[in-house]
Image (tube, rainbow, N blue to C red):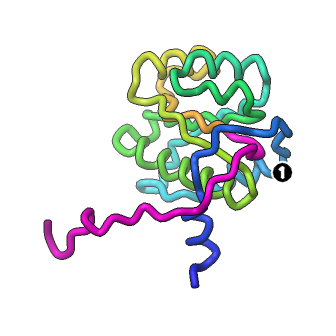
Amino acid sequence: MVGELIGTILSRRSIRKYTGEPVGEEDVKTLLEAAMAAPSASNRKPWHFVVVTERGTLNRLAESHRYGKMLHDAPLCIAVCGDEGVSERFWVQDCSAATENILLAATSLGLGAVWLGVYPSKDRVEDVKEILGIPAGVTPLNLISMGHPAEKKEPRTQYDESRVHRGRW
């Protein structure tokens, strides 16, 4: 029998279609609490989160990101950013862990979400920084497009035994 956490992990799918219903502020806080519960090298916590619900800003992000057209219909976007002054070496790993926690929390809350990479694409980084007013020294790692799902995808595993090496390669 698969446990509840494993069930959530296997149910997490990239959802790009949303009903348009707003995501409640309580759910947003839960998503951010989950993000900040992520592991962080030396507990430096270099992350910052920009919560975007304003339609004009969501549309600008959608137009600026090559793969972000779903933001036109998303009621919520969370930009996960790393402060390189806090953790120059491990901010990407720390913010990636926070991102995965957001994605799993969204699934647990019945929301749909998809991770849109920003860093290390210089053009995407510059566009997102300009649109969201992100200060120097802080880099957007990704955008998470999110909302109540208007599509359903079945849980799955992508387990591939050929990628498992035991003891050594």
| Left/right of residue 96 with respect to residue 101 in the rendered view | left
| Left/right of residue 140 with respect to residue 53 in the rendered view | left
Three-letter amino acid code of the residue under disc 1: Glu
Residue at left offset 74%, top offset 46%: 149
The N terminus is located in which quarter? bottom right
Residue at left offset 73%, top offset 50%: 111
Which residue is the site of mark 1? 26
**Is the magenta region chiefly helix, strand or loop?**
loop
Where is residue 130 shown, x and y percent of the image?
Answer: 58, 14
Local packing at callout 1 (Cα closer than 10 Å; few below 14, some 14-19, many 20+) is few
Where is residue 92 shown, x and y percent of the image?
Answer: 42, 42
In what element is the residue under mark 1?
helix
Q: Within the image, what quadrant is residue 71 found in?
A: top right
Taking depth in this image into account, of 19 and 58 the one nearest to the observer is: 19
Query: Residue furthest toward the bottom?
Result: 1
The C terminus is located in which quarter? bottom left
Taking depth in this image into account, of 78 and 81 the one nearest to the observer is: 78
Could one spot residue 35 in this view of the protein? no
Q: From what the image shows, is residue 30 above or below residue 46?
A: below
Magenta highlight range: 146-169
Residue at left offset 85%, top offset 39%: 21
Asked whether 97 falls inside the magenta stretch, the response is no
Where is residue 167 shown, x and y percent of the image?
Answer: 17, 75
Residue at left offset 39%, top offset 29%: 120
